[in-house]
Image: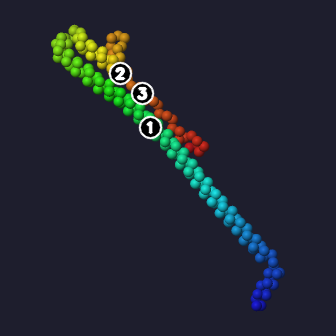
Amino acid sequence: MRALGTAFALIGRHWRVPVALALAAALAGVIAWVDHRAARRTEAQLRATQLMIENRMRADLRRSEARLAGTIAALAADYEHSRTVIERTRTIVQPTVTREIVREPRLSDPAAGLTPGLFDAINRARATGACAAAAAGGIRCPLPQPAPAREPDDRGTGPQGH
């Protein structure tokens, strides 16, 4: 009991020490609480930023896929048109030319002109295909249009600057 009395007497004379310790403990508790709340808020902001970046990346991916699908569709249409022209030319012109060559022996003579049947077959081929008559009596077959230039890469734009 005597030790307890001595402790109270010591506290009574030096009451500022326990008060200072209590204030220091309270201050440490407040700092820990504020730090904990700030950490939670920072984690929430990081999650929100990550979700925003993911959504932006998904949107960019969808736009890129749409551009790619459009390019593929245009290439497929060009291919199909070219295939149709080649097929039409092969099925219409080739048999007629072969038949006319077999039927008309004067075609082997370079000085001879075209037969009416061969001339008609060539004109039909011109009308149905991509080739057109030229001014000097020749045939002009335009080349397909070149592919459009690549769109600029937009990865370097935005607030991040990279």
Mark 2 Cα-neighbour bin, 10 Å: few <14, some 14–19, many ≥20: some
- Disc 3 on helix, strand or loop? loop
Q: Position of residue 85 (x, y in %)?
A: 32, 24
Establish if 91 lies above or below 136.
below
Residue 68 badge: 1
Mark 3 vs mark 1, foreground winner is 1
In the shown orientation, is residue 71 left or right of residue 97? right
The residue beneath circle 2 is 130
The residue shown at (16%, 13%) is 105
Q: Quadrant of residue 46?
A: bottom right
Q: Position of residue 33 (x, y in %)?
A: 68, 65
Q: Quadrant of residue 45?
A: bottom right
The residue beneath circle 3 is 146
Label 1 near label 3: C-beta < 8 Å? Answer: no
Mark 2 and mark 3: span between their CA atoms?
16 Å
- Applied colour scheme: rainbow
Inspect the image, locate mark 1, and give the three-letter code of the amino acid beneath it: Leu
- Disc 2 on helix, strand or loop? loop
Q: Nearer the viewer, residue 45 or 149?
A: 45
In the shown orientation, is residue 15 left or right of residue 131? right
Mark 2 vs mark 3, foreground winner is 2
Mark 1 Cα-neighbour bin, 10 Å: few <14, some 14–19, many ≥20: few
Establish if 137 lies above or below 54.
above
Label 2 near label 1: C-beta < 8 Å? Answer: no
Inspect the image, locate mark 2, and give the three-letter code of the amino acid beneath it: Ala
Q: Which of pointers 2 and 3 lies earlier in the amino acid sequence? A: 2
